[in-house]
Every structure is written in structure tokens, then in C-alpha cells.
């Protein structure tokens, strides 16, 4: 009996490396849908396959859903590489749900400037960024206001009728847009909410769904839409009646955060490094029309002309936003919704 137990134990020990290898035969990563998914397949998963010979299974999952999964099984995540919102990435790092990115684990991180990592204490890094800008129907609004404050005042005055859509504070990046507006009004939150309320009679919708928002604009139900730059420029390129521009004094940075959950296999670092590699970064920028973060990448001139330069965007103070969100949401629901 003792001999049989020893033989079984020996068999288990001998099979352990094989079992680990099987368990790491693929990794599970997350992505947004549409062109984001296509880019993840063509650029990131392809690089990972070429490097390791293994597959990266890509799941479509929103940031809040990812957080629920990570919190439900800390240290034993069902996901190996995740894409989070900026505030969720901060929370996940603080809660011990992520592993720090180092140059030893991810060599390409050396080419990612600190501004894209500092607020997240290296528990996550921006993989691409964009900005909220303005889309207009050039046939209806041939001379749109050059700055944000004029745009807001003209909307409130009814200059464009009820054919304008701004992002709702309740959508994932709504608090960041609200933070940005406070920077235009010397930090005066009361003024920002007064402006939200003043615009309300002339807002077709404070949008929550980005798909619905762009569909409204595409159907010409609205003439002015505050939207993300990459999708806005791509739409304007395909629809000559549409224009997209950045009002003065610029826009706020909106980003996709890349991270490895604590407890995910070390193999996942290869995928993270692939995402940040020059070839995959350039391919991603070409497909999604957003700037990327590897400083060694040189954009082709035509692509560079379509991308919002870093100097035109302000990176929000996400720690401040996290503290402000509960009060802002309460006020929005009472005064605007």
C-alpha cells in the first residue's frame, strides 16, 4: 500500500510540469468590440502567437465586468491580461489585484514615457489614448465655435436648436469630461452644473451609449456631437459632410489601460510586451486611429495628421475624480437627469 502511494505521488510530481504546460497552452485576454477586437487579433494576438506559438483567446468585456471577475477571485484570475478604464486600473492596483510592470518582465515598457504610467504606479500602462472632441454637420454648422466655452454658451442660447448631444456624466468617461469642464471654469463645479442645466433644453440627448450617439449623428438627427477623436476623424473621412475638430484650449485624455492580474501566468507578460512593441503599436494606431504610447514609433505623415497630438490633451487627475464621482453623480441625478 505504501509503495503504491509513493508511486502515485511520483507520478503526480512527474506530471506536474506537463499539467502546468497544458494550463498555459493559451492565455485569455480582453478587448472592446468592433475595430478594437480586429486590431487585437491582427496586432497583439498575432505577435503573441509568433513569439510563443500559443493562442491568445480574446474576450469582449467591459471594465466594470472585469473588475467584478478580479474581485471575485483575487490571486486566481479567470483573465490573464485585461484592458481597464483609468479609474478602475487605479482601484485594481490599490486593491492588490494587479502585478507591477517592470522592464525585466516587459522590455518594451522602457519606451513608454512615465506620463502614461505614473498615476497607476506601474500596475497598469496606457496602451493607446484619445480625446473628446467635437463633430459637426458641416452643411448645417459651417463655422463652429473655436472654443469650448463659446460652444457651451451658444448651445445654451439655442443657436443650434435641439440638435446637440454631449456625453452624460453617467457614461464611463463622463466624470472625466466633467473634470475637464471644471478646468475651463477655474475649478468651479457649480458653474459646470449650471452650464449642464442651461444646455438641457437644447440637448437632444446627454448620451450614454457611444454606438447610439454616433448613430444619431450618422442619421443626421443631430448636428453637433461631442465624441472621441479616433472614431470622429474616421467617420469624417468617410462622410464628407461631417467635420471633426478640437476646440480651444484642447481636450481631455481618454485612455485604454493595459494590465496583468495578480496570479495570471508569467506567459501573459509576453502578450503585454507584444501590445507595447513598435510593430504592434503602429498597426494598432493605423486600425483604430488613436495615438499609441511607444515613443519609438514613427507615424506615417497621413496617419499623424489624423491623430490628436499629446500636447493638445490634458490628462485628468484620476485620484481627484474617484473622490468626486459619488457627489457628482448624485447632483447629476437630482439636477440634470
Image (cartoon, rainbow, N blue to C red):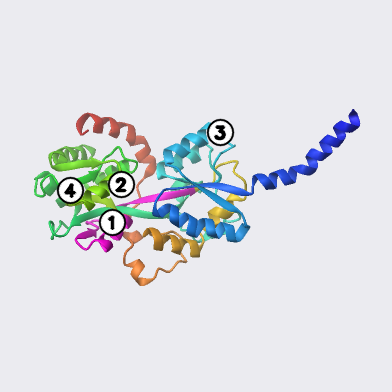
Asked whether residue 124 appears in the rendered view, the answer is no
Please say whether residue 322 is one of the residues in the magenta stretch: no
Q: Secondary structure at mark 2?
A: helix
Task: Specify whether 228 is left or right of 13.
Answer: left
On the image, the x and y values in percent for residue 27 come to: 58, 48
**Callout 3–callout 2 Cβ contact below 8 Å:** no
The residue stretch that appears in magenta: 229-258
Residue at x 35% of width, y 67% of height: 304
> Mark 2: few, some, or many residues within 10 Å (few <14, many ≥20)?
few
What residue sits right under mark 3 in the picture?
73
The mark lying in front, picked from 3 and 2, is 2
On the image, the x and y values in percent for residue 163 come to: 15, 47
Residue 261 is labelled as none
Q: Quadrant of residue 328?
A: top left
Residue at x 17% of width, y 42% of height: 204
State whether residue 72 is above or below residue 239: above
Q: How many marks?
A: 4
- Whole-angstrom CA distance, mark 4 to mark 1, is 16 Å
On the image, the x and y values in percent for residue 118 come to: 46, 50
Earlier residue among tags 1 and 2: 2
**Callout 4–callout 1 Cβ contact below 8 Å:** no
- Whole-angstrom CA distance, mark 1 to mark 2, is 12 Å
Q: Secondary structure at mark 1?
A: helix
Task: Specify whether 325 is left or right of 165.
Answer: right
What residue sits right under mark 2 in the picture?
211
What residue sits right under mark 4 in the picture?
221
What residue sits right under mark 1 in the picture?
232
Amino acid at each position: 500500500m505504501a509503495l503504491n502511494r509513493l508511486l502515485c505521488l511520483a507520478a503526480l510530481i512527474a506530471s506536474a510540469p506537463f499539467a502546468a504546460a497544458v494550463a498555459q497552452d493559451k492565455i485569455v485576454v480582453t478587448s472592446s468590440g468592433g475595430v478594437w477586437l480586429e486590431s487585437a487579433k491582427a496586432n497583439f494576438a498575432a505577435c503573441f502567437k509568433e513569439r510563443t506559438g500559443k493562442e491568445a483567446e480574446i474576450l469582449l468585456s467591459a471594465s466594470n465586468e472585469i473588475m467584478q471577475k478580479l474581485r471575485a477571485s483575487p490571486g486566481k484570475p479567470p483573465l490573464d491580461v485585461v484592458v481597464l478604464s483609468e479609474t478602475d486600473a487605479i482601484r485594481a492596483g490599490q486593491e492588490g489585484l494587479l502585478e507591477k510592470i517592470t522592464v525585466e518582465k516587459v522590455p518594451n515598457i522602457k519606451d513608454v514615457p512615465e506620463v502614461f504610467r505614473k498615476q497607476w504606479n506601474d500596475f497598469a500602462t496606457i496602451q493607446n489614448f484619445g480625446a473628446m472632441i467635437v463633430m459637426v454637420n458641416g452643411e448645417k454648422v459651417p463655422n463652429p465655435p473655436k472654443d469650448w466655452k463659446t460652444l457651451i454658451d451658444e448651445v445654451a442660447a439655442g443657436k443650434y436648436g435641439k440638435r446637440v448631444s454631449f456625453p452624460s456624466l453617467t457614461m464611463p468617461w463622463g466624470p472625466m469630461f466633467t473634470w475637464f469642464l471644471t478646468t475651463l471654469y477655474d475649478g468651479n463645479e457649480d458653474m459646470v452644473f449650471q452650464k449642464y442645466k442651461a444646455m438641457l433644453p437644447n440637448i437632444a440627448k446627454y448620451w450614454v451609449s457611444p454606438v447610439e450617439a454616433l448613430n444619431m449623428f450618422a442619421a443626421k438627427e443631430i448636428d453637433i456631437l461631442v465624441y472621441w477623436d479616433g472614431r470622429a476623424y474616421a467617420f469624417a473621412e468617410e462622410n464628407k459632410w461631417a467635420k471633426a475638430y478640437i476646440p480651444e484650449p484642447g481636450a481631455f485624455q481618454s485612455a485604454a489601460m493595459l494590465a496583468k492580474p495578480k496570479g495570471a501566468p508569467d506567459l501573459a507578460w509576453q502578450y503585454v510586451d507584444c501590445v507595447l512593441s513598435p510593430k504592434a503599436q503602429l498597426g494598432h494606431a493605423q486600425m483604430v486611429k488613436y495615438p499609441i504610447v511607444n515613443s519609438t514609433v514613427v507615424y506615417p505623415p497621413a496617419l499623424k495628421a489624423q491623430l490628436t497630438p499629446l500636447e493638445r490633451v490634458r490628462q485628468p487627475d484620476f485620484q481627484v475624480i474617484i473622490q468626486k464621482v459619488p457627489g457628482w453623480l448624485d447632483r447629476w441625478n437630482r439636477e440634470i437627469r
